[in-house]
Image (spheres, rainbow, N blue to C red):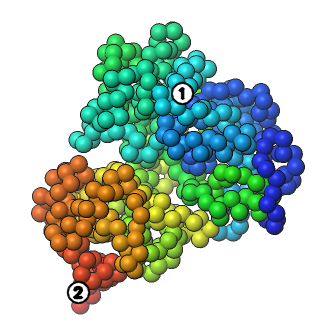
Amino acid sequence: MAASARNTTGVALSDATLPGLAEAISRPTYDRAGLRPGIVHIGLGNFHRAHQAWYIHRLMQQGEAQDWAIIGAGVRTQDQDMRSRLLAQNYLTTLIELSPTGKSAEVIGSMIDYLPIETDNTALVRQMADPAIRIVSLTITEGGYFISSNGEGLDLEHPEIQHDLCTPEAPRTVFGAIVAALLARRTAGTGPFTVLSCDNLRGNGTIARQAILSFAQQVDPDLASWIDSHCSFPNSMVDCIVPATGPNEISLAQGFGIKDAAPVTHESYRQWVIEDDFCAGRPDLEKVGVILTPDVHAYEVMKIRILNAGHQVLANVGEQMSVQTIAECMAHPLISQFFKKVEHEEIVPYVTQVPGMAPKQYVSLIAQRFSNPEIRDTTRRVAFDGSSRHPEFILPIVRDALNSGGSVEGLALVEALWARMCAGVREDWTNIESNDPNWQNLSAIAQESARRPETWLEQRHIYDTLNEDPIFAPAFCRWLQLIWSKGSLAALEAYIGQAQNVKSETSG
């Protein structure tokens, strides 16, 4: 797959131009015209193409999974741009692997269509109702599940969900569309499909099941019972660092002689762990390295707590201090010390070992991956949608630590740094543009918390009762006051110095 870069704008990527690519660039060896659909993927972006679509492509390269081709779909108007770009290049994608030792490129072709973006999702419902579709997979982000404020099931009061409940024949949401398709399949007698969540949520399959059953129960209780009995919702864990695409990534593809309007860069590491629970069959994913297991929980806890929570440890302070990428955060002497101290002292104690990997080993692996300077994963991207990511990635660890009598000093500092970042102005006085669906409200609360730190923790939909905790709340307030008065760097120095002071007192 390795290739040497060439200074050219490249040839426009398409089926017709594949034979003209540089010899060292891997490309589909299968007949794409003969592929048949088996998967609809909703929320098709960079991660899916670098991860799930790549695994299916690998199977196709072995002469298998020819009836498991992917049809992309989206339910947001902004998905139209991605559809237009991919349509123009026959849905091919250039994947560029960035390792510390060099770059390489390959073209994958497991995707064969991308449905039109419609306000009533007619095409999506019709495609999912096709009996050829046996898996509907999702990467709709943590915020796309409309989780209720108590964390249990679907938020039935959300305006988008209310719209779909009132007009189920013209759904706007993923879950309204899935339920409409399953209703059509039950009526036609064509059987169920598997809903495979690939989002960074603990128990993502369980959450998807709850959302779909909650919605279906409101529409038709008999349908809900049929879905519960016949459909499957395996939990899964996905892992690969995939930066956003911009001019630099397009230029990288051109360096390989490929003019790709939507190339994807990624690290030289992938992992996919799935519960082996598929009601309508599945590709032989184990043949390309996917781990099929009856229990994903330990894998997903390790990844979400060490990698995803670790991302939040770095991203908010990095954004606040104008450190642009995760790799640059790891190269910063204080930010990297902060990351390692929080990981080892306040996260690892609440992670169990998985086959072949102890938690401390995984921290070392993640630190190595985060430090890859070739991966320009921006702190802004990683910090996006903190109002969904902090309750999912950070706060469960806080609660476990409090219940176990462990330290939460570093985790309280992580939350204080997020609050400071949401005020919208970096410490060099540059503005932080909107970076959360709830940005306007978060910014107002963050600015008020500069005067009264408790204000931030009083967001019950995020922190529940943590504002009343006698250990976490005072620690948070103390850190936020220090950040506002002396800056983020001073707070990091104080936190790192705590361990040094303890060691000095012990040795004395």
Res. 96 image quadrant: bottom right
Tell me the residue that label 2 is attached to: 505
Q: CA distance from mark 2 to mark 1?
A: 64 Å
Question: Residue at the spot x=59%, y=32% of the render?
Answer: 116
Task: Give neighbour class at mark 1: few <14, some 14-19, many 20+ (Cα, 10 Å).
Answer: many
The x and y percentages for residue 275 are 48, 35
Q: Quadrant of the N terminus?
A: bottom right
Res. 485 image quadrant: bottom left
Question: Residue at the spot x=21%, y=75% of the render?
Answer: 481
Q: Quadrant of the C terminus?
A: bottom left
Image position of 421 (left or right of 5): left
* Disc 2, SS: helix
The x and y percentages for residue 157 are 26, 34
Amino acid carrying label 1: it is Leu
Question: Residue at the spot x=34%, y=29% of the render?
Answer: 163
Task: Give neighbour class at mark 2: few <14, some 14-19, many 20+ (Cα, 10 Å).
Answer: few
* Disc 1, SS: helix
Mark found first going from the N terminus, 2 or 1 = 1
Pick the residue in front: 418 or 225.
Answer: 418
Pick the residue in front: 112 or 152.
Answer: 112
The x and y percentages for residue 437 are 37, 51
Camera-near label (2 vs 1) is 1
Tell me the residue that label 1 is attached to: 124
Pick the residue in front: 312 or 434.
Answer: 434
Amino acid carrying label 2: it is Glu
Image position of 149 (left or right of 330): left
